[in-house]
Structure formats: C-alpha cells, structure tokens
C-alpha cells in the first residue's frame, strides 16, 4: 500500500505571535514545528505500512524552512519526501495548497492520502477535502480508525456527542486524520541517521504554476485581540440574580 502524508510547518504553540507589517500574516521570526494533527496522520501511515507493507511518502508545501518537517518525517520512518517549495507558500489558502499538492503528485499512484484534520495556524480543515475533489477520488474526514476492507478501506469517523460513523471507501481515497487516533512515536538516533540518505525531492511552486493568485480566500486583517476586563456585580435576591445571570449568558454571551 502506497500512502502519501501531507504535513505542514506551523508556528510553535508557545511562540509569541507578532503581526507582520502588512497585517496579512505573522512575522517570520518565530519558532516553528510540525502541525500536530499531521503528526498523527504520519503515525497512522507508518502503522499501516508496518502492518500491511508498502511505502510512506511525506509531502509539505512551504518555504525553505519547511523542509525541517520532512526531515523529521523521514527520521520517524517515512521512505521519501517531497518539498513543494516557494517563498509565498505560507500565503496559499486551502484551495491553492491542494492545487499545489495535486500537481506535485501528478503521475504518482497512491492508494491512500492522509492529511491532518486541520492546521493549527489557519484551521480551515479544507485542504484534504479539496484535494480529493481535485483528484476525483473518495474522501472521509475526522478519521479515528483505518482498516483494510474488500476493495478498499473501512474507516471510523468521529461525530458529535460521542457518536461514530463507519464507512467503506474504495481506493484511492483521501482521509483527514483526527488527533488522538494513535500514540505518537519519537525519532530514534538510528532513524535520524538513516534520514540523511533518504530521497528528498524539491519541486518549485512556480514550476507547478501555483501562486497566491489562485487563492479563493484572503485574510483581510490579522490582529491580536485587545484584552479587556469588566466586572459587573448582580445584586438582589438569589432567585432574581439567578434569572439575570441566565439571561446574560443566553442573550449577551450566547453560551447557553
């Protein structure tokens, strides 16, 4: 089974976010890490290969610094990697990123394509679904389990309120993986050494004809919310105060 795993480099969770001068994104001088949902997608791909054989290929769309997530994927066990590189790659929306992936793997035949459920920066949760549509293949989201089935795979999807859905999908298919589907592994010292000799191909976004001009969405303004603090004391009999509080939570804060 040949599996492609799409991974993304995102700002680290504890990185102090600073808005860039144009207000369209953040400054580049922050720490970066692998998008956590994508790490779970990679782990699931490696487990599928270990159980059923085949090849795991890691792919990222990003500037030069994003090659680090591919080196980490190779160290954890991916067989090879593809870097779709471009200085403006971080400005691509879900549609343009999916176009870049689809064009980069043209001619390749993957049985499964895994992505994380969503990225921790933009958080759109659309790239995997759009990629499936561009490739004209089946897809399913919020995956918690993947098992081989006759002519394809059987997947378990997480729904709301503790419910799950089971689906049989034909191959090839795109699956967006939910965080927590498995336990993440660490790269071993041997894995880090072996990663240096594994293939890592680079494809330029410009050669694929992809740029932010393909975006279907745009960021109008990015800003850090201003922290405000306001305390209001509700007075009166307990019954009246409870009624006032319930009304505020329902009508003003809309949490009930």
Image (tube, rainbow, N blue to C red):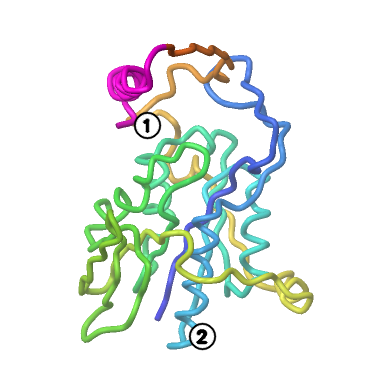
Query: Where does label 1 land, which residue?
Result: 215
Query: Where does label 2 land, which residue?
Result: 50
- State which region is magenta: 236-256
Q: Crowdedness of circle 1 by 10 Å Cα count: few (<14), some, many (20+)?
A: some
Q: Is residue 61 visible?
A: yes
The answer to whether residue 133 is magenta is: no
Q: Quadrant of the C terminus?
A: top left
Disc 2 vs disc 1: which is toward the camera? 2
Image position of 96 with respect to 180: above or below: above
Image position of 35 with respect to 76: above or below: above
**Residue 212 in the figure: left or right of residue 22:** left
Residue at image position (43%, 12%) is: 235
Image coordinates of residue 241 in percent, x first then y, are 37, 18
- Quarter occupied by residue 148: bottom left
**Magenta portion: prevailing SS class:** helix
- Quarter occupied by residue 71: bottom right
Comparing 25 with 233, the one in front is: 233
Q: Crowdedness of circle 2 by 10 Å Cα count: few (<14), some, many (20+)?
A: few
Residue positioned most to the front: 237
Image coordinates of residue 218 in percent, x first then y, are 40, 25
């Amino acid at each position: 089974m040949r599996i492609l795993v799409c991974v993304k480099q995102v700002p680290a969770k504890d990185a102090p976010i600073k808005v860039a001068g144009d207000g369209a994104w953040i400054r580049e001088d922050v720490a970066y890490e692998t998008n956590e949902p994508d790490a779970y997608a990679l782990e699931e791909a490696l487990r599928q290969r270990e159980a059923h054989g085949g090849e795991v290929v890691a792919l990222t769309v990003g500037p030069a610094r994003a090659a680090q997530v591919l080196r980490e994927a190779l160290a954890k066990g991916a067989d090879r990697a593809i870097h779709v590189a471009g200085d403006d790659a971080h400005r691509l929306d879900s549609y343009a990123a999916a176009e870049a992936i689809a064009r980069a793997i043209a001619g390749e035949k993957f049985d499964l394509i895994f992505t994380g459920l969503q990225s921790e920066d933009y958080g759109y949760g659309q790239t995997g679904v759009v990629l499936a549509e561009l490739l004209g293949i089946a897809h399913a989201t919020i995956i918690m389990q993947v098992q081989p089935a006759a002519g394809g795979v059987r997947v378990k999807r997480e729904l709301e309120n503790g419910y799950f859905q089971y689906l049989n999908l034909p191959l090839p298919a795109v699956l967006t993986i939910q965080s927590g589907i498995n336990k993440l592994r660490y790269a071993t010292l041997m894995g880090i050494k072996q990663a240096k000799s594994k293939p890592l191909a680079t494809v330029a976004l410009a050669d694929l004809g992809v740029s932010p001009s393909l975006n279907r969405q745009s960021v109008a303004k990015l800003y850090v919310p201003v922290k405000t603090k306001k305390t209001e004391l509700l007075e009166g009999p307990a019954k009246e105060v409870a009624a006032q509080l319930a009304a505020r939570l329902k009508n003003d804060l809309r949490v009930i």
